[in-house]
Amino acid sequence: QLFNLLASQPNANPLVMLDELDKARGDERFDPLAALHTLLEPAAARNFVDLSIRDLAVNASHVNWLATANDLESLSKPILSRFSVLHIPAPSAEQVSTIVKSLYQRIRNESSWGQHFASTLCEEVIGRMSALAPRQIRNTLQRAFGAAARAGERPGGAPGAGGVPVPGALGDAAGAPAGPGAVPRARRAGVPARHQPQRPAAPQDQVQEQVV
């Protein structure tokens, strides 16, 4: 892959991101990080031979490497010595709140059904979700969107919002107290639909049934 990266673009100094380097696992026969001992040393990387193309050496000395890790103890000292280690603290409550708002807007804007939901989350839901790890926020939001849709919440439930009420199913899925229209517990627990209480038909639904 590194050979293809250098051969397929005009720049000789691409940025390569290695996410969660500490989770790379091997055994006595194969070390997935072995190549980094050569690639992270500019002098040795000038004649790097990719395993996929053994007959041709490439100059990878100008590649910029960036890696993340959660546990530095899992990495060997030779690998660590080739990096400048920066310790990044966990996001503050204010930063997590910004992350929640940003992810909510991204999911809403990228989805064709996003316009049916409130343009912003209420502070109560944001506060509840701020207790989650950043990785869990997106998954929780996606489940909450689905829960709100299944609950059949209708537009106009939140003051000043153009979408479905929040909190409600969104707030309930995030751990906030359930509001009007929240998803029934039976449905959240995975009980088959035939055993779930039926939602009363809205007036306009009743009219349609009579017309038909």
Image (cartoon, helix red, strand yellow):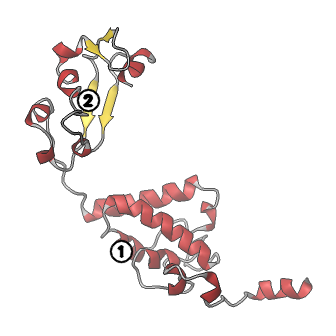
- Relative depth, front residue between 199 and 110: 199
> Which percent across, then down, holds residue 152?
64, 78
Q: Which residue is mark 1?
A: 128
Q: Earlier in the sequence, mark 1 or mark 2?
A: 2
- Neighbor class of circle 2 (other Cα within 10 Å; few <14, some 14-19, many 20+) is some
Cα distance in 3D space between marks 1 and 2: 37 Å
> Which residue is found at the position 19% from the left and 21% from the top?
38
Image vertical order of residue 140 relative to residue 42, above or below:
below
Quarter of the picture holding the N terminus: top left
Q: Quadrant of residue 145?
A: bottom right
In the image: residue 208, left or right of residue 15: right
In the rendered structure, find residue 65 and report the number of the disc placed on it: 2
> Does residue 171 appear in the picture of this structure?
yes
In the image: residue 190, left or right of residue 72: right
> Which residue is found at the position 25% from the left and 58% from the top?
91
Q: Quadrant of residue 63?
A: top left
Mark 2 residue type: Trp
> Does residue 184 appear in the picture of this structure?
no
> Which residue is found at the position 47% from the left and 61% from the top?
104
- Relative depth, front residue between 186 and 50: 50
> Which percent across, then down, holds residue 101?
42, 61
Q: Quadrant of residue 6?
A: top left
> Which percent across, then down, holds residue 9?
44, 18
Mark 1 residue type: Arg
- Relative depth, front residue between 84 and 7: 7
